[in-house]
Amino acid sequence: MPGQVWTLADLTPEQQRLVAEAEKDLGDGILLAFARGTVAPSDLTPDQLARLQALEKQLGLVLVAVRSS
């Protein structure tokens, strides 16, 4: 079943300029721009899922396995 996922946005130069301008106005930190997309989750075996979860724990990250298009 396809689901929605957020990925880093592919901004045009004008969009990059506007984001940079907003960052300057906010004065602290940076802005991350995300775009919504649709993906289908991978069908993982229990062993694959355990390996993925162990890697998440090791890296301190959240990993999402999706089917390649």
Image (tube, rainbow, N blue to C red):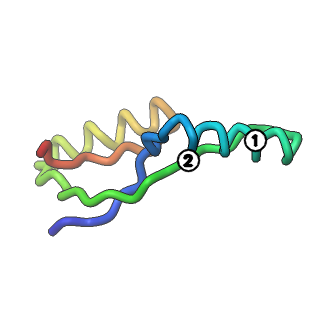
Of helix, strand and loop, which one carries label 2?
Answer: loop
Whole-percent x and y of residue 59? 47, 30
- Disc 2 marks which residue? 33
18 or 50: nearer the viewer = 18
Tell me which corner region of the image, top left, top right, bottom left or bottom right, holds residue 5: bottom left
| Left or right placement of residue 68 versus residue 51 in this view | left
Disc number placed over residue 21 in the picture, else none: 1
For residue 66, above or below residue 30:
below
| Left or right placement of residue 4 versus residue 23 in this view | left
39 or 9: nearer the viewer = 9
Mark 2–mark 1 Cα distance, whole angstroms, equals 13 Å
17 or 32: nearer the viewer = 17
| Among numbered discs 2 and 1, the one appearing first in the sequence | 1
| Left or right placement of residue 27 versus residue 63 in this view | right
Give the label, 2 or 1, closer to the camera: 1
Disc number placed over residue 47 in the picture, else none: none
Q: Quadrant of the N terminus?
A: bottom left
Whole-percent x and y of residue 31? 67, 44
Of helix, strand and loop, which one carries label 1?
Answer: helix
Tell me which corner region of the image, top left, top right, bottom left or bottom right, holds residue 58: top left
Tell me which corner region of the image, top left, top right, bottom left or bottom right, holds residue 27: top right
**What's under tag 1, amino acid-wise?**
Glu
- The residue under the point 85% across, 45% down is 25
- The residue under the point 46% across, 45% down is 9
- The residue under the point 57% across, 44% down is 15
